Amino acid sequence: MTETTFSFIPRAARSAKPRRIGITEIRGPYYSAYGVRHLADILETVGTWVDGIKYAGGSFALMPAEAVRSINKLAHDHDVYVSTGGWIENVVRFGAEAVDRYIEETKALGFDVIEISTGFISLPTDSLLRLVQKVKKAGLKAKPELGIQFGAGGSTSTEELAAEGTKDVGWLIAQAERALDAGADIIMIESEGITENVSTWRTDVVARIINQLGLEKVMFEGADPQVFEWYVKNYGNEVNLFVDHSQIVQLEALRSGIWGTKSTWGRIQNLSD
């Protein structure tokens, strides 16, 4: 692991890259546009703590191919994997040939992971599993994104989502188990309906997911600092989290136990092997 300043000050243990747990995936261009220069600043300063970068909302489809290749190469130069967002749920509307071409192009552009989201569409489980198998056959990693809230993944209002209702967590767990059996590498858990766009957090849902699937096989979307703080405080500093790129320093300070709020100050601990 890269030597940091003030390394003589004790901190909570963190595993080195490539990590299998305690993964931090950061959002790529979406809420703000950025390219290799901004990403280089992030990776040159705190790249040790960035495991993956995800292009959200199909943002790569608005960019020149060379810009996407350059971002992906820079990430790889810093041992950071590159993931698509869940844009495949847009692609599947245009049929199997479009899906196959999408997978081929993502590989050609240097992506490592394809996220398979179904927040906006109704997709049978068997179709989800076929997508996982297609991605794996192409030599890429498959990351299904599952949630309990239909319509998740966009800027839909809290009231509109509430009107949709939520799915049972048992259904999510069953889908996740089948996806993992089909070769999925990790399951992304969508935050809507759990910690986002809800009046009360569904902490019971998180507990059931972790108890059934384990920490290593799931990644939680931490949409806000109070959300990722709650995950670290309750499940330790090796919970896998997806956050905005602007939050990487704040999250790692919390994971390492070098800073925090009143409720976490001095309380984040971990023992090395």
Image: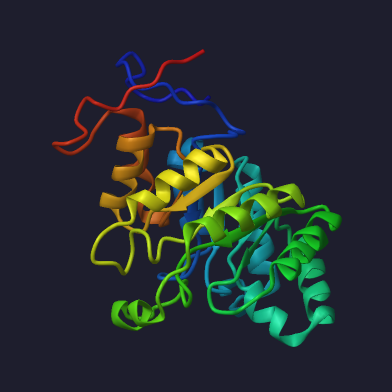
Relative vertical location of residue 115 with respect to residue 141 in this rendering, above or below: below
Q: Is residue 36 visible?
A: no
Relative to residue 230, is residue 44 drawn left or right?
Answer: right
Q: How many numbered discs, if any?
A: 0
Residue 65, quarter of picture: bottom right
x, y (%) of residue 77? 65, 43
- Of 8 and 269, the residue lying toward us: 269
| Residue at 42% from the left image edge and 70% from the top image edge | 166
| Residue at 48% from the left image edge and 57% from the top image edge | 169
Q: Is residue 28 visible?
A: yes
- Of 180 and 44, the residue lying toward us: 180
x, y (%) of residue 74? 62, 51
- Of 119 and 86, the residue lying toward us: 119
- Of 197 and 73, the residue lying toward us: 197
Q: Name the outermost residue toward the left.
A: 262
Relative vertical location of residue 123 with respect to residue 260 in this rendering, above or below: below
| Residue at 70% from the left image edge and 58% from the top image edge | 111
Relative to residue 64, is residue 119 drawn left or right?
Answer: left
Relative vertical location of residue 270 with respect to residue 64 in this rendering, above or below: above
Q: How is the image coloured?
A: rainbow
| Residue at 54% from the left image edge and 46% from the top image edge | 218
x, y (%) of residue 70? 65, 60
Relative to residue 202, is residue 53 drawn left or right?
Answer: right
Residue 130, quarter of picture: bottom right
Q: Name the outermost residue toward the bottom.
A: 94
